Amino acid sequence: VSINHPMPTTSEQKLEQAMLMHLVVSLCALLGLACLSASASAFLVWERTSASKHLQMVSGLNRGVFWAGAYVWDLIAFGPPLAIFLVIFAASEEEAH
């Protein structure tokens, strides 16, 4: 039977661990927000392949109304995840963010 008694961590090691943890949290947040913002292009790709904008323009819809609707949808789709993200950061009380 072996027993392990590690040395206590020094303040320098604790600082290094904290910095690495902040780096990991920052990278995870960055990756999550990058995926969220990249999903905005999905509508543009879908519109290009389905030609829904062209169909609506031929039907007489104003171009500004089409893009206003797309903007409102983006606000509805991205607002709640962004609000949750901001609430989590505010609740974590991290100085680095």
Image: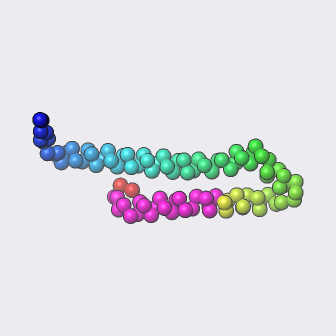
Residue drawn 26% across the image and 44% down it: 16
Drawn side of residue 71 relative to residue 91, left or right: right
Point out residue 83 in the picture as x, y percentages from the top left corner.
51, 63
At 62% across and 62% down in the image, what residue appears? 76
Q: Is residue 48 above or below residue 76?
A: above
- Where residue 54 sits: x, y (%)? 82, 50
The quadrant of the picture occupied by the C terminus is: bottom left
Residue 58: percent from the left, percent from the top? Answer: 88, 54
* Residue at point 79%, 57% (across, down): 63
Q: Is residue 80 magenta?
A: yes
> Quadrant location of the N terminus?
top left
- The answer to whether 84 is drawn above or below residue 17 in the figure is below
Q: Nearer the viewer, residue 12 or 29?
A: 29
Magenta range is 74-95
Q: Position of residue 74 (x, y in %)?
A: 64, 58
| Number of marks | 0
In percent of the image, x 28 and y 49: which residue is there? 18
Residue 3 in which image quadrant: top left
List the single residue furthest toward the top: 1
Furthest residue in direction front, as rendered: 1
Magenta segment includes 61 = no
**51 horizontally vs 87: left or right:** right
Which colour assignment does the render follow?
Answer: rainbow
Predominant secondary structure, magenta span:
helix
